[in-house]
Amino acid sequence: MKTFLTNCTVVDCTGNPPQSNMSIVVENDRITELLNGVTMSEAKVAERVLDLEGGYVLPGLWNVHVHLGDLIPDPQLLLETESPIDYAIRAGRNAMDGLRAGITGLRIVGEDHYADFAWKRAFDAGVFVGPRIFACGRAMSITGGHGHGTLGALEVDGPFEIRKAVREQLKYGADQIKLMVTGGVMTEGESMKESQFLMDEILAATEVAHQKGKRVCVHAWGAEGVKTAIRGGVDTVEHGLLDDEAVELMVQNGVYYVPTLNSTQDTEKILKGRLPDFMVEKALGAAEAHLKGFQKALKMGVRIACGADASPVTDHTLLEIEHLNKAGMTEMEALVAATRTSADLCGVADRLGTVEVGKLADLIVLSANPLQNISNIRKLKMVLKGGSLVDINPQEGQADYRKFFF
């Protein structure tokens, strides 16, 4: 099908200024032309002409730190009582809601029951309409380390067990590998700053993953753990209480940074989110160092991508983009983090993440300019995935995700 999108301003997220009075030609699933203005003769050759009424066209948004089945808080104790089938259904609903909010790309960084692989296959095959998924399978922690007992995390020790676990994820189709290198907020009885995996274990993981051409991402809060992970060859750092040396190492080694700012910076969410006291204490206690480290990374040119690390995906992706802006990124920088850089982190910047000729037509249309106010990303008019229109209207009779599960 040939689709003509006309009367719009294009924010292509390459870093270039917006282009007004534009038309976009989409043939099947790809962008084939970007035209200034439009003539009726050009529009007549299209099977579908959509007047965007001055709307703003951007690439679809991304969230590259997602656990589809995560529930914090979990008042119904679903993570302890639900079946794998119930879990998988809930995870898929979370993903599909995200697409209807304009989030067209997700990197899943640790999931139980291999639900991420199942939903990736289902969306790719068109069994359901959902975002593009890049999956890590089961994350890995040391015995008793961060995340043990949650979201299917594997407890592994030593380079031999690590190699086996990495190869197992690759066997099931992992796009990237996830390691829990330090303590964190959600696991009781550990410090966020404590290092857990050792250098020989990290090296074993990166050697096996890189041999297969796959990247390794790491949960790492403490700066010493971040530096050990980078020296061990990892490709992306999640969270990060970064010091100067850690930032320098990230720049030198081309490491991506996914800061998940809302996990420490959104005081209202943290205080009103019915979290256990130990989580609240850790998150708020790390807020200042987290912000300062992010700002150092931004100043030094570290490649920063957008990841929220919280569900529902819909709410927290948009919230994280707003926090990137609030913490020091310009509106354009925040949008690039949530589009081009996130696609690049997933290794698909050649076909996704910007509005350019030849790219897949994963597009959103906003009614107001996000470069004037980043919260205008919430004013969604239209979503296309691969050139196909996505129904963004609430489905009559469908339960609200947050009210039903939280």
Image: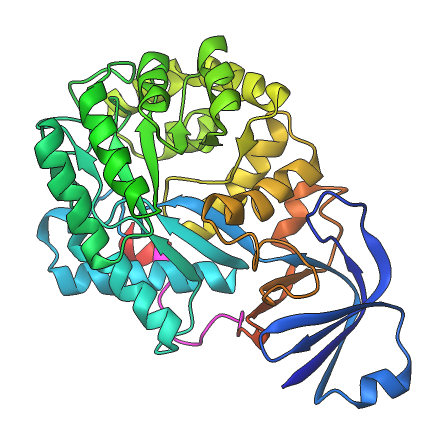
| Nearer the observer, 344 or 252 | 252
Up-down relation of residue 212 to residue 287 (above or below): below
Residue 110 in picture, x, y percent from top left: 26, 45
Up-down relation of residue 95 to residue 146 (above or below): below
Q: Does the stretch in magenta take in 400?
A: yes
Q: Quadrant of the N terminus?
A: bottom right
Can residue 72 be seen at all in this image of the molecule?
no
User: With 263 as the anchor, is 111 left or right in this view?
Assistant: left
User: With 71 as the anchor, is 61 left or right in this view?
Assistant: right
Up-down relation of residue 245 to residue 370 (above or below): above
Residue at position x 64%, y 25% in the image: 328
| Residue 143: quadrant of the picture | top left
Q: Residue furthest front?
A: 211
| Residue 37: quadrant of the picture | bottom right
| Nearer the observer, 364 or 107 | 107
Give the prevailing secondary structure in the magenta stretch.
Answer: loop
Residue 186 in picture, x, y percent from top left: 25, 29
Residue 161 in picture, x, y percent from top left: 9, 35
Residue at position x 58%, y 48% in the image: 339
Can residue 176 be seen at all in this image of the molecule?
yes
Residue 270 in picture, x, y percent from top left: 39, 29
Residue at position x 26%, y 35% in the image: 207
| Span of residues in magenta | 391-401
